[in-house]
Image (spheres, grey):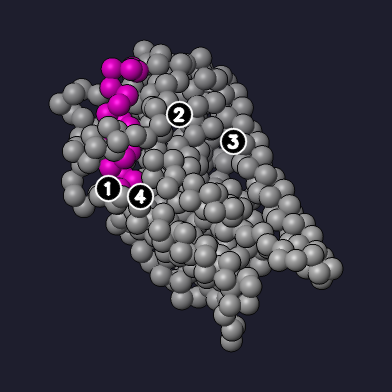
Amino acid sequence: MPQVTDWADVRVVGIPRALLFYRFGVLWTTFFEGLGRTVVVSDPTDKAIADEGERLSVDECCLASKVFVGHVASLAGRCDAVFVPCYPTSDHRSGFCTKFQSATDLVRSTFRDQHLRVISCEVRNARKMKDVRRAFEELGCRMGVAPRDARAAFKAAWEAQEAHDKTAADGQLRIMRTLDDRRRAAERAAAAGNGDVRQPLGILVVAHPYITHDPYLSGAVTDALADMGATVVYADAVDHEKAYKKSFEFSDTMPWLINRELIGAILMLEDHIDGIVLISAFPCGPDSMTDDAIMRCIQGKPILNLMIDAQSGTAGVETRVESFVDILRFQQKGGYVRG
């Protein structure tokens, strides 16, 4: 049976800077570049992109999905086809929200009148390299690339993503070591009677990477934390495999991979940080369950739970963050009696 090469004429691939781009974007871009294609990533989120996504989406979609649709719209006319992969759930302990399973069909339906071309692949299990490889090699073959070249492109892409993830995890470890060193130095200074020594403050930001690393969506939070002198640590940047395994100490039944990694990161880092900031995009289904579980079950660390939506202004968020940091500073000075 001859190989289907219906996407062989796609020379410029558009990739929306949203959703799983912030988790697998290095793999995607490196793969297509390895096939000899030009990759166009949509511009960073701004009000125009968010508003267009809001206009094209139904009300029930979460904010992150609406922003994603806005990014797809921004790529129209800039590429031969938009890459929208499908990540279904084949492993009930490392699956994805339904929006990642339906993204391909959602885009094709939303932009059918604009005749926006969509290329895709189905990754059955994102944690198993052979499953990811199979999906991308088939995609490469449909783009008219020889199987050998598709395998080589995928190998380079997988290694690039691993290197990127390791760099991020190593960076977080350096931040944590520096934070611990600063704490010890502050304790020594206080013991020596060197006046009112200010303890460093470490805040763990827990959110899906497409929220954490999109300045339009979470910049008000992370900027406010930095402005108040807090050291910001990101839960999504720790070693993913270690965090995934650690998450089973919290729940054996949680079905979502990214939420597992975030909760595992909390368990790995909770002894090194002073507070936790949870950020969710309204109305995220998985977060509505996991954030509640975190609030109930993670004891001993103050937690600020923030929900952002399309109508949210930044002033209220900044005020809540500032109040949270003030409370943590007050607690550092012994302002609260701990039970």
Image quadrant assignment for residue 333? bottom right
Q: CA distance from mark 1 to mark 3?
A: 31 Å
Q: Sequence-wise, which precedes: disc 4 or disc 3?
A: 3
Q: CA distance from mark 3 to mark 2?
A: 19 Å
Q: Is residue 130 visible?
A: yes
Q: Amino acid at mark 3?
A: Gln
The magenta-colored residue range is 63-80
Q: Which residue is mark 1?
A: 310
Q: Amino acid at mark 1?
A: Ala
Judge the density around disc 1: few (<14), some (14-19), many (≥20) Cα neighbours within 10 Å: some
Q: Amino acid at mark 4?
A: Thr
Residue 161: give its label.
3
Q: CA distance from mark 4 to mark 2?
A: 44 Å
Provide residue 194's location: percent of width, then percent of height.
79, 65
Image quadrant assignment for residue 100? top left
Residue 330: give its label.
none
Q: Sequence-wise, which precedes: disc 1 or disc 2?
A: 2
Residue visible at 20% across and 22% down in the picture = 115
Q: Is residue 114 above or below residue 102?
A: above
Q: Is residue 166 above or below residue 117?
A: below
Judge the density around disc 4: few (<14), some (14-19), many (≥20) Cα neighbours within 10 Å: some
Residue visible at 52% across and 69% down in the picture = 327
Q: CA distance from mark 1 to mark 2?
A: 38 Å
Image-based side of 291 in relation to 299, left or right:
left
Residue 138: give its label.
2
Q: Amino acid at mark 2?
A: Glu
Image-based side of 206 in relation to 105, left or right:
right
Q: CA distance from mark 4 to mark 3?
A: 33 Å
